[in-house]
Image (cartoon, rainbow, N blue to C red):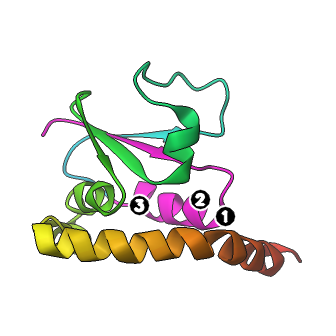
Amino acid sequence: MKSLEVFYDGGCPLCRKEIAYFRALKSRIPVIWLDLTDLNAELPDDLDRCNALARMHVRVDGQSYYRGAAAFAMLWSQFAYWRMLGLFLRIPPVTCCANWLYHIFLKLRPHLQRWVQTQEKP
């Protein structure tokens, strides 16, 4: 793996916090962070903005896309303190369970976003 592109929802306060955390860490390879809510951002032709906003997406070496838990596994495996969890998450039965949990999280995400937004207001 030579590069990783992370497509994230910059309109989501949870996503912004997570991305800010990872951007501050040193990665093993170059990571390109692409905010899907930035309408001026150039997205790959084969990536649908609406679908990408619905769940985490990463692209490896400009070719292979990973979604959901597999995307987190690819991202986390590039950072020292997260590497082992990322590698563990790549094991198929673990990935399957993580996708199930991620699906539940996605249903709760709008409520969590509202809660985080109320916590951010002074």
Q: Which mark is residue 22?
A: 3
Of the residues shown, which amino acid type is indicated by label 1? Pro
Q: Quick check: 31 left or right of 73?
A: right
Q: Which mark is residue 110?
A: none
Q: Residue at x 21, y 44 (%)?
A: 29
Question: Looking at the image, is mark 3 or mark 2 nearer the viewer?
Answer: 2
Residue position marked by numbered label 1 in the rendering: 13
Q: Earlier in the sequence, mark 3 or mark 2?
A: 2
Measure how far apart labels 1 and 3 are at the Cα level.
Answer: 14 Å
Measure how far apart labels 3 and 2 are at the Cα level.
Answer: 10 Å
Residue 6 picture quarter: top left
**Who is closer to the viewer here, 114 or 97?**
97
Identify the element where label 2 is drawn: helix
Q: Residues within 10 Å of mark 2 (few under 14, many from 20)?
A: some
Quadrant housing the N terminus: top left
Q: Which mark is residue 16?
A: 2
Please state the horizontal and vertical placement of residue 26, each as a whole percent of the image.
Answer: 30, 56
Measure how far apart labels 2 and 1 are at the Cα level.
Answer: 5 Å
Of the residues shown, which amino acid type is indicated by label 2? Arg
Residue 90 picture quarter: bottom left
Of the residues shown, which amino acid type is indicated by label 3? Phe
Q: Which residues are magenta?
A: 1-25
Q: Residue at x 78, y 71 (%)?
A: 117
Q: Is residue 4 above or below residue 114?
A: above
Marks 2 and 1 close (CB-CB < 8 Å): yes
View extreme (top): residue: 45
Identify the element where label 1 is drawn: helix
Q: Quick check: 115 left or right of 29?
A: right
